[in-house]
Image (cartoon, rainbow, N blue to C red):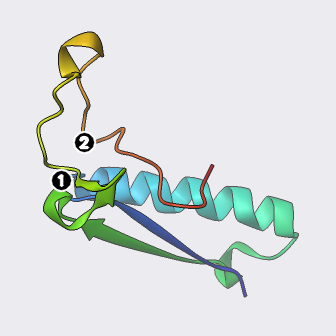
Amino acid sequence: MPVVTVDWWKGNDRQKRADLVEEVTTTLARIAGCPREAVTVLVRDVEQDHWGRGGVLADTPDEDAADRPPRTREAGPAPAGAR
């Protein structure tokens, strides 16, 4: 009975959540060798002002942003331990 929790920035629509649940379920069932029905996926939307990384909140403007491509909601930082 695998349970996976995904924390990501709020703002992803229902279709993206459905796609995420589908992909995670398919992959985990294949790797774990269990039926898809045994896989539970929890998706938690987190406001950027409730997400800290490197000692600052994610909604804090980045002073070095001009040197990097823009940050998008879909590609928010990976949760701790996901790397």
- Residue at the disc numbered 1: 11
**Is disc 1 surrounded by few (<14), some (14 to 19) or many (20+) residues within 10 Å?**
few
Where residue 34 appears, as percent x and y from the top left, is 82, 76
Drawn side of residue 43 relative to residue 13, left or right: right
Q: Nearer the viewer, residue 29 or 76?
A: 76
Tag 1 secondary structure: loop
Toward which corner of the image does residue 61 lie, by quadrant? top left
Q: Secondary structure at mark 2?
A: loop
Q: Amino acid at mark 1?
A: Gly
Residue at the (30%, 16%) spot, across then down: 68
Point 47% across, 55% down: residue: 20
Position of 61 with respect to 68 (left or right) is left
- Front residue of 15 and 79: 79
Numbered tag placed on residue 73 in the rendering:
2
Give me the residue at 22% from left, 50% from top: 58
**Where is residue 70 drawn, in percent x and y?**
23, 22
Residue plotted at (18% across, 13% down) = 66
